Image (cartoon, grey):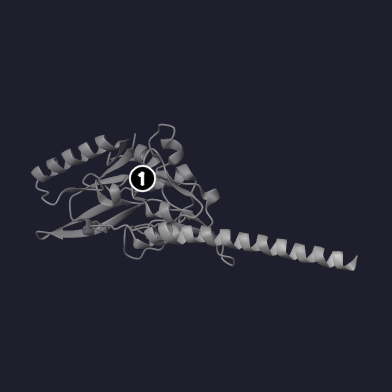
């Protein structure tokens, strides 16, 4: 059964409890920051920050309000990162999330380039050689695979986060949107139901997607399709041709060598 995370931005209080829970569960170090006039901390996702709360100011009808957004891997159904990964370090799990096996990652960075949401970050271990590993939220794949909820969901004090079967998540999200509209939030909507085949993170928004920093219509990049359908198959063919050429060269050299031996005799 496909699982999804529901993120109700209308009740999120921006406490960042989910950020802390994520770091604690995965034993991730804090990111040193400097106050530059924003409540956001850190300022972006990184190798040690797999989820973060975005703070956005939104003005509507002469009123300004905060819009909080839990930001991280969207676990797309049409996952470009999976399609471009040459080592299968990224996979689409049967439960719906995009898993990551870091031991298989070769640090190519294709996933970070193909992602429509600019999510995966590279954890560089050697600046000289450029050796790196991809990092991103995996929905706490170890917990979810054992019928537990992600650490962020379990921690959220405002119950802005929940985790359930996808059909139940969508039903809850749509019901919540209807309630919000009755309360005067005319722009309330569900985000993630159909985008890129359906997102693992389903949002209840109270303003346009762009106000939260979300793409209104995220698109599967042409690069991903090109890589999957052209570049990778060509690479396999090229590798096969090289191997065949080396084999032919070895046999030809071997034959010539044996001919030289016969001549000496």
Q: Kindly identify which residue carries mark 1.
A: 17
Across and down, in percent, residue 100 comes to 47, 47
Q: At 9% across and 47% down in the image, what residue appears?
A: 184
Judge left or right: residue 251 versus residue 56.
right
Judge by depth and name the residue closer to the eye, 60 or 100.
100
Q: Residue at x 26, y 38 (%)?
A: 169
Q: Residues within 10 Å of mark 1 (few under 14, many from 20)?
A: some
Q: Look at the image and tell me whether residue 126 can be seen.
A: yes
- Can you say whether 62 is above or below 179 in the image? below
- What's the residue at 41%, 53% (across, down)? 83
Task: Provide the secondary structure element on which disc 1 rests.
Answer: helix
Residue 242, by quadrant, is: bottom right
Q: Quadrant of residue 35?
A: bottom left
- Viewport quadrant of the C terminus: bottom right
Q: Position of residue 3 (x, y in %)?
A: 33, 38
Horizontal side of 210 relative to 179 (left or right) equals: right
Image quarter hosting the N terminus: top left
Residue 109 seen by the camera: no
Most extreme residue toward the top is 147
The residue sitting at 54% across, 50% down in the picture is: 104
Spot occupied by residue 229 in the image (x, y as percentages of width and height)? 41, 57
């Amino acid at each position: 059964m496909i699982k999804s995370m529901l993120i109700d931005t209308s009740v999120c209080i921006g406490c960042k409890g989910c950020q802390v829970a994520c770091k604690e569960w995965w034993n991730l170090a804090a990111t040193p920051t400097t106050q530059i006039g924003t409540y956001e901390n850190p300022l972006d996702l990184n190798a040690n920050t797999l989820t973060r709360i975005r703070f956005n100011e939104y003005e509507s009808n002469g009123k300004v309000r905060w819009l909080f957004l839990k930001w991280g891997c969207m676990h797309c159904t049409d996952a470009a990162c999976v399609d471009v990964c040459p080592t299968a370090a990224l996979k689409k799990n049967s439960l719906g999330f995009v898993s990551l096996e870091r031991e298989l990652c070769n640090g190519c960075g294709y996933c970070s380039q193909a992602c429509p949401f600019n999510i995966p970050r590279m954890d560089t271990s050697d600046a000289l050689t450029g050796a790196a590993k991809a990092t991103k939220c995996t929905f706490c794949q170890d917990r979810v695979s054992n019928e537990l909820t992600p650490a962020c969901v379990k921690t959220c004090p405002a119950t802005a986060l929940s985790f359930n079967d996808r059909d139940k998540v969508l039903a809850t999200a749509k019901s919540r949107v209807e309630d919000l509209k009755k309360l005067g939030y005319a722009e309330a909507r569900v985000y993630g139901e159909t985008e890129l085949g359906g997102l693992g993170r389903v949002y209840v928004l109270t303003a346009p997607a762009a106000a939260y920093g979300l793409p209104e219509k995220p698109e599967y990049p042409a690069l991903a399709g090109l890589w999957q359908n052209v570049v990778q198959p060509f690479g396999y063919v090229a590798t096969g041709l090289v191997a065949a050429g080396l084999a032919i060269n070895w046999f030809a050299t071997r034959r010539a060598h044996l001919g030289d031996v016969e001549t000496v005799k």
